[in-house]
Image (cartoon, rainbow, N blue to C red):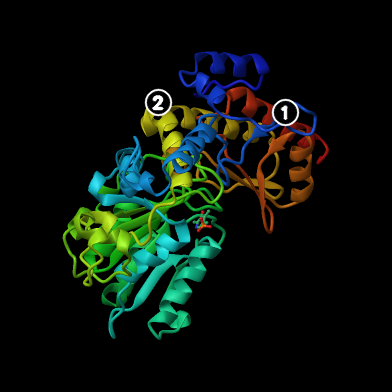
Amino acid sequence: MTSFEPTPDFAAQLDAQDPLREFRNQFYIPLGPNGQESVYMCGNSLGLQPRTARAAAERQFTNWEEMAVEGHFRGDTPWMNFHARLTEATARIVGANPLEVVVMNNLTTNLHLLLISFYRPTISRYKVLMESSAFPSDQYALESQVRLHGLSPDNTIVELAPRPGEHTLRTEDIVAKINELGGSLATVIMGGLNYYTGQVYDMAAITQAGHAVGAKVGFDLAHAAGNIPLHLHDWDVDFACWCTYKYLNSGPGGVAGAFVHERFANQPELLRLAGWWGHDEEERFKMRKGFRPMRGAAGWQLSNSSILTMAVHEAALAVHDAAGGMAALRRKSELLTGYLEFLIKRLELPETQLEVITPTNPAERGCQLSLLVHQNGRELFDHLMDAGIIGDWREPNVIRLAPVPLYNTFQDVQRVGVVLAEWAATQR
Ligand SMILES: *Cc1c(COP(=O)(O)O)cnc(C)c1O
């Protein structure tokens, strides 16, 4: 890994040795402005479409066409408990027992549902800890949850910011803040992998620290699920949620996931917003009064499943599994992102112009690198886009590039290096 080279031949050689090289062919690669396949570095925002996705959805169109309402109970994929078809593969992705996960709704919806159960402020214990640069939807969700309890966000939500001059949070500072808040801390809710910086937080350490002061701990895994290895059960995390359209390739607005630790599996009295799909399956259609939740995360379901998006999700999860799951993806991912990092360092641009704010330690990042471009950032972004490299721009001046091990190649990364070097040459 120390001996990367910037040449196309070297990149082609890495691709030839890549055990996952065939998986790119299982996705549609959008064309760039020059009519050639683009270099898609935006899987952190919307993963590419697996070629099997359309047929999976069409199969359900056919079931609907042929069986109509009977499709809930008949056919080879009865809709009545379709969510159960996704449980095993989902549990593998997040490191959970099948009982602990459920696929339902969308991400922010699931965040709200889980906060209802795991943010239960009392007179003395009411504060919430989150990272200062959390994704806006998470901030809005939390503010409104706090208001729901008649509290004011200003003296309830505690935001953790990096030290002056630093871009990422130190675990020791997160733990120190948790200890400082102590008995006033109700809930910690953070991104598992910060969407802006690409930093992976030490979820095990944060959970342990939170539990030590009696708080609940949850993570938004939008940028972590399908990107980094997760062990939610072993880390003892209380709750988590994620979307499936980023690194899980399940389509725009696709169905989302939720995790609730096993220790809450048999607590029907645990407060939640209830709906009929979370009600005991055996009795669901008896249409009786009195909510009796299913065991585990399934007991947080509200509505009957969104079958079309779930069918696509199932097809996408099958591709992840066929690739060998997170362990295999991670091996390639570290190499791929390491190569991108190598090419960026080679530009030898001063930090006053361009800094990678994502941690350099592979254990503290996923596939994404965030480039903080102090000068002419928008110009660089446009230059990349013109060259058919699709990344994304985050105000005020960050370019996020995410080489995804399932479908990106070392030659993709090499091309990014070439285009970055062209731009760097104009900056001196
Ligand atoms: C992508 C993302 C979202 C988006 O929320 P939706 O409910 O899926 O629209 C929310 N939070 C984080 C941290 C994200 O990365």
Report x, y in % for residue 161.
Answer: 49, 64
| Three-letter amino acid code of the residue under disc 1 | Val
Q: Quadrant of residue 89?
A: top left
Mark 2 surroundings: few (<14), some (14-19) or many (≥20) residues within 10 A: few
- Give the image location of residue 383, x and y in percent: 78, 40
Q: What residue is shown with label 2?
A: 322
The residue that label 1 is drawn on is 418
- How many numbered marks does the figure carry? 2
Rendered view: 418 above or below 307: above
Q: Quadrant of residue 14?
A: top right
Considering the numbered disc 2 on the image, is that residue within a helix, a strand or a loop? Answer: helix
Secondary structure, mark 1, is helix
Q: Nearer the viewer, residue 345 or 217?
A: 217
Among all residues in the image, which is located at the extreme left?
Answer: 266
Q: Which residue is located at x 38 percent, y 72 percent?
A: 128
Residue 273's image quarter? bottom left
Q: Is residue 156 visible?
A: no
Q: Distance from label 2 to label 1 (Cα)?
A: 32 Å
Residue at horizontal 83 percent and vertical 38 percent from the top? 426
Q: Is residue 32 visible?
A: yes
**Quarter of the picture holding the C terminus:** top right
Identity, as a three-letter code, of the amino acid under mark 2? Ala
The residue located at (72%, 28%) in the rendering is 418
- Specify which label sits upstream in the sequence, 2 or 1: 2
